[in-house]
Image (cartoon, rainbow, N blue to C red):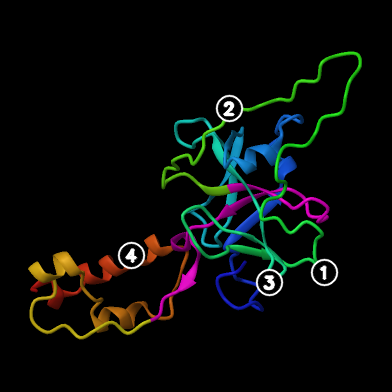
Amino acid sequence: MYPQPLGDAELSPAVVATPLSQLNLPPHIDLEYVASVKGTLDVPHRLVSNQAETSGAVRWVDSDGVNVGTKVRVRTFTYNAENNSYEFIRDGESTPALIWTPIDRPADSSTRSPAGPPVLPTDPGNAVTPFVPELDAYPAVDRDDPDDYILISPIDSGLPNTYLLFKDPRSIPGVASGYGEAVNGVWLGDKTRAEGASIPAHIADQLRGRRFGNFDSLRKATWIAVANDPELGRR
């Protein structure tokens, strides 16, 4: 769950997880059913990356439906019988983002957990009506919204249901590296408008080894260095 090998206390986690109870959801929602139909739930607040921090911190914000959307996707692990592991694959991806391997092979090796909604007990006094939330199957998620999920753990796994935030790699702090390329002739011309341009080698020399809070900070520093370079200004 970290972008680099472990052992560095300054590393910022690529995934932030917190108990689902932090969202204060109504107690009677059938989360397993919502996950089985790939639905969403309206939540009162969500985690977002704090772009102003250099530590890659996150913070809670109110989901007002204007600045921050209210709907969070509800998903579950799927069982991989070949590897005896439970995997969570994010929407639109084909490789697991999270893998959990139980000590014992589960008796039910279905790829869904559970296969259907649980059977409600018989109540001789009053009719029992399950709460069914409004669902959006395969909802469109705005790219500016937090990349978050409510993840339902396998039954009898001992794992709690969790609220997860996957942080945009561009928001994670890091140290600039790379050497750029020497500039011969025009640096920003018609060709580079379509294909992009490499960072000039002497600009890369100024940035290499510096720590930035996010990619936007690196991009800003790059253009400041370019603007202060008289040679590039003539090209």
Which residue is drawn at the image coordinates 33% and 65% (left, top)?
Answer: 219
Q: Helix, strand, or loop for circle 4? A: helix
Q: Indicate which disc, 1 or 3, sits on the residue closer to the N terminus.
A: 3
Q: Is residue 204 magenta?
A: no
Q: Are marks 2 and 1 in contact (CB under 8 Å)?
A: no
The label shown at residue 127 is: none
State the extent of the magenta-drawn residues as a range.
149-177
Q: Quadrant of the C terminus?
A: bottom left
Q: Residue, x 58% and y 56% (percent of image)?
A: 57
In this rendering, the label closer to the viewer, 3 or 2 = 3
Compared to residue 45, the image places residue 16 above or below, namely below
Q: Is residue 154 above or below residue 8?
A: above
Disc 4 from disc 2: Cα separation: 42 Å
- Is there any visible trace of residue 189 in the rendered image? no
Q: Identify the residue under disc 1.
A: 103
Q: Judge by depth and name the residue closer to the eye, 199 or 71.
A: 71
The numbered mark at residue 134 is: 2
Whichever of callouts 4 and 1 sits on the residue coming sooner in the sequence is: 1
| Helix, strand or loop status at disc 3 | loop
> Mark 1 and mark 3: span between their CA atoms?
12 Å
The residue labelled by disc 4 is: 219
Residue type of the residue flagged with mark 3: Asn
Quarter of the image where the N terminus is located: bottom right
SS at mark 2 in the image = loop
Q: Which residue is mark 3?
A: 83
Residue 176 covered by magenta stretch: yes
The single residue placed furthest to the top in the displayed view is 125
Q: At which x and y percent is residue 165?
A: 58, 52
Q: Within 10 angstroms of label 3, few (less than 14), some, or many (20 or more) residues? A: few
Q: Give the side of residue 224 with respect to residue 8, left or right.
A: left
| Label whose residue precedes the other's in the sequence (2 or 1) | 1
Q: Position of residue 208 (x, y in %)?
A: 38, 80
